[in-house]
Image (tube, grey):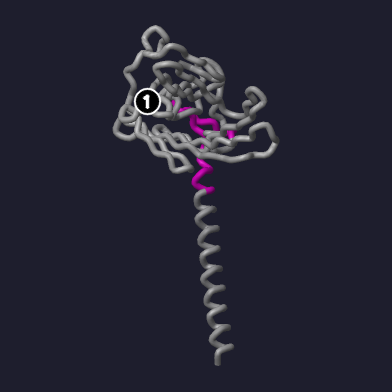
Amino acid sequence: MKKLLLLFLVFVLFSCSERDSESDIQQFESDQSGQQDIVTDAYGVQYPGLEPPAYQYCGPGWGAKMCRFLTKYDGTVWADADNYYSDFSDVKFEKFSSGSHFISFFNLDSITSYCEGWKLGETIYNGIKWNVEIKKDEEDVLWFQYDYYGASEEIEYSITYKYEVIDGLLHFSSSEGQTFIFHPSERNYSEDFLNTNEIIRLEGCMF
């Protein structure tokens, strides 16, 4: 009797697992089919000859027209007004107007301030390697993945960053559990106006 009961439980568990697997596959296929729309740039022009998704073409030069989020928020600067002098940076977005970088960070301090930025794709700076890849690009939402290699050829860790503008505020979150809310910044970021003794401009600074 116990053996029959055990066999019955195994059969039920297997059936449920199979249904869950089929459901996952159907959901994946549905998501994939939803991505088969015609590639359209930020201005509404369609490119039937290009393979979706459109965000894979976002980048410097011709690809800048494919960047929905960066097109809308090009040149905007955002500050964490509630905790301004923390280790977390002010953020600036650019649609590759000054090169291949699209996001820049500013850490302000009364003695020494730091500015750096990231570009899409692979970067090697002072022997340290990282790679940035867009995962989602909509008019008010930008997700990208940051893969850090360090001095090796293997990924040491990956972090996903999300920026979303809601009611005029920039909401930030990461796969590491960080969350911040930024306000549009009115600050003048030129060295003559900032309350700091020195600004160290690192790779990709766009301020």
What's the magenta bit mostly, secondary-structure-wise?
loop
Using a 10 Å C-alpha cutoff, classify the residue at mark 1 as few (fewer than 14 neighbours), some (14 to 19) or many (20 or more).
Answer: some
In terms of depth relative to the viewer, which is nearer, 129 or 36?
129
| Residue at screen point 55% across, 17% down | 99
Tag 1: residue type? Tyr
Q: In this view, does 162 lie above or below 13?
A: above
Q: Which residue lies furthest to the front in this view?
A: 111
User: Quadrant of the rendered structure where residue 148 is?
Assistant: top right
Q: How many callouts does the rendering have?
A: 1
- Which range of residues does the magenta coloring cover? 32-50
Q: In this view, does 70 lie above or below 179?
A: above
Residue 183 shows in the view: yes
Q: Residue furthest top?
A: 192
User: Quadrant of the rendered structure where residue 106 is?
Assistant: top left
| Residue at screen point 55% across, 92% down | 1
In terms of depth relative to the viewer, which is nearer, 49 or 133?
133
Q: Which residue lies furthest to the bottom in this view?
A: 1
Residue 44 shows in the view: no
Q: Whole-percent x and y of residue 80? A: 35, 28
Q: Name the residue under label 1.
A: 85
| Residue at screen point 53% across, 74% down | 13
Q: Whole-percent x and y of residue 40? A: 49, 32
Q: Does the magenta stretch include residue 2?
A: no
User: Quadrant of the rendered structure where residue 49 is?
Assistant: top right
Q: Whole-percent x and y of residue 109? A: 41, 20
| Residue at screen point 54% across, 86% down | 5
Q: Is residue 41 magenta?
A: yes
* Viewport quadrant of the C terminus: top left
